[in-house]
Image: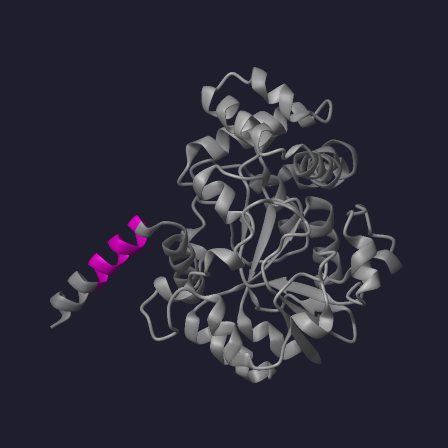
Amino acid sequence: MKDQLIALLKKREISLYYACQLTDFWSFLTNGGISSKAVLETKGQLSLCFSSDTLLKQNQTWNKVILKISDAGAYFFRYAKGIPNPFGPIVFHIKPEALTEVEHIDIYKQSSASPLFNPNNDRITDISEINTFFMHPETTHFPEKTLLKPDFQDKTGLEENQAPEIVCTIESGILPFKNYIAMAAIDQYIINQRQLSAWVDDLRFNQNYTFPTFRRYCPSNISVAICRAIGDLLIHRIPKLNDLLQADHSEVRAWCQEMINQDMHKPFMTYVEYLQKGTIHPVYNEYPEIFKELSYRPKNKTESHYDQLSHEQAIQIIKHLAREDSAIAERINHLASAFTANQC
């Protein structure tokens, strides 16, 4: 089944996803890969207690590495609707070949972090059933063949409302990075006058990892304004939705009112509490020595990392951008057609 799944994912040209906070990102770097909750707990690296942790233990996935087939944060940043991913602002895009490191996989229609999870009813035994998650057949052109049906997308940011997942059993409890990380997308928060992506790169540099990172592409400028307003407040306190009704930007206030109308108070509080403890405060309280150590690195604002990308990494980034924005996909198709015509 594992080989079949790898083949299907590659044919659809999709990545697997894992979102985390900055504290977990640092733990993963020091451990050499994405680590199960059990590994983090054993190593004393479990910095956050999610409300879904009890369910993971109850459903016997605490010692597993759980991957998604969709980027739960994409919907918010694309449309400025719902709540950002509560699990974290750093999203690994993982190549399907990473599953070769796994001893056993289970595929579920519903997250094991959901109170409705039933391993017997939710387990997928026929790999072809995964194709039913998608809007178009696997023979369709890219990026259409990567699009999930609305029912299988996580649009709300609720922990218990997740898209289908792949539960990986690994003897070490760690899915090694090796060359399996296509990229890491970083949400657009400003912390201490620097983009979060800059802090992430400092940690990555410290551990000598070369996988590419980039700020998440945001078709909606409103989502960026929302994140920055929230990030500013989180430095000093945990805000409530009502606090954002006083935001400077009318678009932020409008989003906030929509969330209030949808009674999203609880998921919003979950999201901001995790973000403050797992990402915002660590920059100030837990990692200053690491960042100080790295301060010798020249900061050339005009420096470009594009020339350092491999051909494969560049293709992965182009595909990601095409999935995020249909206009980009159309432009890529147009350029490809023009290039082909010129070659003839």
Q: Quadrant of residue 41?
A: bottom right
* Residue 186 visible here: yes
Q: Position of residue 221 (x, y in %)?
A: 42, 33
Work out whether 67 lies above or below 255.
Answer: below
Depth order, front residue of 264/183 = 264
Q: How is the image coloured?
A: one colour
- Who's the residue at 49% across and 24% down the image? 254
Q: Position of residue 59 (x, y in %)?
A: 79, 65
Question: On the rendered image, what quadrant is the N terminus found in?
Answer: bottom right
* Residue 193 visible here: no
Work out whether 102 lies above or below 18.
Answer: below
- Who's the residue at 49% across and 67% down the image? 133
Depth order, front residue of 51/274 = 51
Which range of residues does the magenta coloring cover?
327-336
Work out whether 159 lies above or below 175.
Answer: above
Q: Position of residue 210 (x, y in %)?
A: 56, 58
Residue 328 counted in the magenta span = yes
Q: Position of residue 2 (x, y in %)?
A: 60, 81
Residue 88 counted in the magenta span = no
Q: Quadrant of residue 238?
A: top right
Question: On the rendered image, what quadrant is the C terminus found in?
Answer: bottom left
- Who's the residue at 17% across and 68% down the image? 340
Magenta stretch: dominant SS? helix
Q: Quadrant of residue 42?
A: bottom right
- Who's the residue at 57% across and 29% down the image? 261
